[in-house]
Image (tube, rainbow, N blue to C red):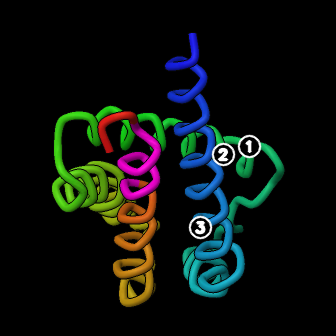
Amino acid sequence: MDLNYRRIGTVALTGIWVSASEFLRNEVFLKKYWVDHYQSMGMIFPSEPLNGILWIVWSFLFAAAIYIISGKFDLIQTTFISWFMAFVMMWIVAWNLHVLPLALLLYAFPLSLLEAFIGAYICRKMSLNG
């Protein structure tokens, strides 16, 4: 039973980290890029409470994926696999839908890589085999 609590705690802590990182990056540092880009398309950037809740759900799902990947790969492999799976693929979809302001990638690229690295680090250090 203790092992299950450790797993849940690891995913929870990683999810908290990812949520905080996402919030700081997109709501504090890069919000102007998003708002301006959406305005240029005649749209309003979606920032209702439901959007925030869905990003929290995404954060914890990403944390669970990092945890699973970290059980099979080392820290660097886990970082790059999880980062590619979550961010690169999301950026391709957002770009394809014409809702990705490409200028923000200058900041989002390194910050998202750092987010994935720290998430992987938390999972590796808190795991029994870490």
**99 vs 110, nearest the viewer:** 110
Q: How far apart are marks 3 and 1 (CA)?
A: 15 Å
Residue at image coords 83%, 49%: 49
Badge 2 local density, few (<14 within 10 Å), some, or many (20+)? some
For the N terminus, the image quarter is top right
Few, some or many C-alpha atoms within 10 Å of disc 1 (few <14, some 14-19, many ≥20)?
few
Residue 58 on image: x %, y %: 55, 42
Q: Answer above or below: position of 77 versus 22.
A: above
- Asked if the stretch drawn in magenta spans residue 34, the answer is no
Start-end of magenta stretch: 120-127
The disc labelled 2 sits on which kind of residue? Ile
Tell me the amino acid under the disc marked 1: Ile
User: Residue sitting at 18 percent across and 51 percent down?
Assistant: 74
Task: Between residue 7 and residue 64, name the one nearer to us.
Answer: 7
Helix, strand or loop under label 3: helix
Q: Is residue 124 magenta?
A: yes
- Quarter of the rendering containing residue 117: bottom left
- Left or right of 118, for residue 58: right
Q: Is residue 88 left or right of residue 11?
A: left
Mark earlier in primary sequence (3, 2): 3
Which residue is labeled 3 in the image? 21
Query: Percent x, y for residue 111?
Result: 44, 78
Q: Nearer the viewer, mark 3 or mark 1?
A: 3
Residues tagged 2 and 1 counted as in contact (Cβ below 8 A): yes
Q: Position of residue 105 (x, y in %)?
A: 37, 82
Q: Please identify the quadrant where the C terminus is shown.
A: top left
Nearest to the observer: residue 77 or residue 49: 77
Label of residue 56 in the image: 2
